[in-house]
Amino acid sequence: MESAARSVFRAYYYGEIRTPILEETQLFARGVGADTDIVTKEMYSFEDRDGSSLTLRPENTAAVIRAYIEHRLDQRPGVQKLYYIGPMFRRERPQKGRYRQFYQIGAEAIGSESPVVDAEVIEMVVELLNRAGLTGFKLLINSVGDQNCRPQYVELLRRELKQAAPQMCGDCQRRADTNPLRVLDCKVEADQPVIERLPTIVDHLCAACRAHFEAVKQYLDDRGIEYEARPRLVRGLDYYMRTTFEVVHGALGAQNSVLGGGRYDGLAGASGFPSARTAW
Ligand SMILES: [Zn+2]
Ligand SMILES: [Zn+2]
């Protein structure tokens, strides 16, 4: 898998980046999102001798962007294409196929707002799965909007959830208040019929987000890549905007995600780091 990944990344002109396994806890709390499962339940954090808080990296995007800013990679010309392969750590409930130290492969294309970059990242991972010999997987795509249109949609969702949430699981009841978008991501079987009736974000995108999403789909069509638009697909991290995608496989059961990714612009309060990414 790793050697297939390295050769596909090379073909798409991605270079390897290695970030430290330990980072300041704040980086993930801010970068990944304070109300995500990763930050609230799953991080291995501990106090260093000087009293500062360190965390074993639960994912690598926040650290890649930190390195990008700190080492002025934005001064280099063109889109920066970076990939990583290495151990990540999450204190998840033990379950089949999940380990608390796991190996993740990921890629980031930083510095372009063009939907063609989103499509290229998706094409690249489909190519990688094909080359690794995986068959029968399904590509799902969606748009989660941006700062312009998402807040109104989240408000609408919040109003709808006033009625619906009391019948839902504990996590959904909490998120209905703190982070309504994440309700859509709930995997609890009994909640699915309720989620199916909630309004979708694709019906509430602003003109710019709609155009971006249409362009991504057009570029995928042009590349001959099959996909299914899933209007309730949101990813488990706060930083996504516009494009999100996921590759699922029927043979994997409830935890059916092979990989996922999307676009984010403006991580950690900074603006102007438009990037398309993927990780699995
Ligand atoms: Zn739920
Ligand atoms: Zn928008």
Image (spheres, rainbow, N blue to C red):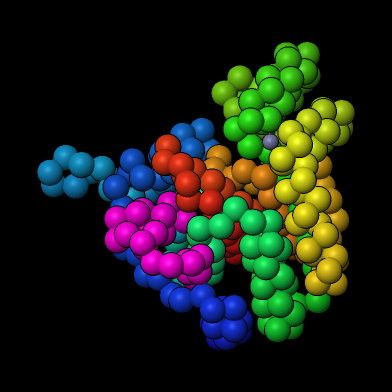
Question: Residue 182, position in %: x, y?
Answer: 65, 34
1 versus 248 height, above or below: below
* Residue farthest front in this picture: 77
Q: Position of residue 58 (x, y in %)?
A: 44, 53
Q: Is residue 147 magenta?
A: no
Farthest residue in the left direction?
50
Q: In which image quadrant can residue 180 be found?
A: top right
34 vs 224, left or right, is left
Q: Quadrant of the N terminus?
A: bottom right
Q: Residue at x 67, y 73 (%)?
A: 124
Q: Is residue 173 above or below residue 196?
A: above
Residue 106 at least partly seen = no
Per the rendered image, the range of residues in magenta is: 61-83
Give percent across and percent down for residue 228. 85, 56
Looking at the image, residue 246 sits to the left or right of residue 82; the answer is: right
* Residue placed most toward the observer, 220 or 88: 220
In front here: 80 or 163? 80
Q: Please identify the quarter of the rendering in which residue 138 is found.
A: bottom right
Which quadrant is the C terminus positioned in?
Answer: bottom right
Q: Residue at x 73, y 48 (%)?
A: 212
As drawn, is 219 to the left or to the right of 87?
right
Q: Residue drawn at (70%, 84%), measured in percent from left and top?
A: 131
- Residue 38 is situated, as x and y percent measured from the top left of the image, at 50, 44
Name above or below for residue 144 compared with residue 212: above
User: In screen coordinates, is 7 left or right of 196?
Assistant: left
Q: Quadrant of residue 203?
A: top right
> Measuring 81% from the left and 57% from the top, which residue is drawn there?
217
Q: How many marks?
A: 0
Residue 44 in view here: yes
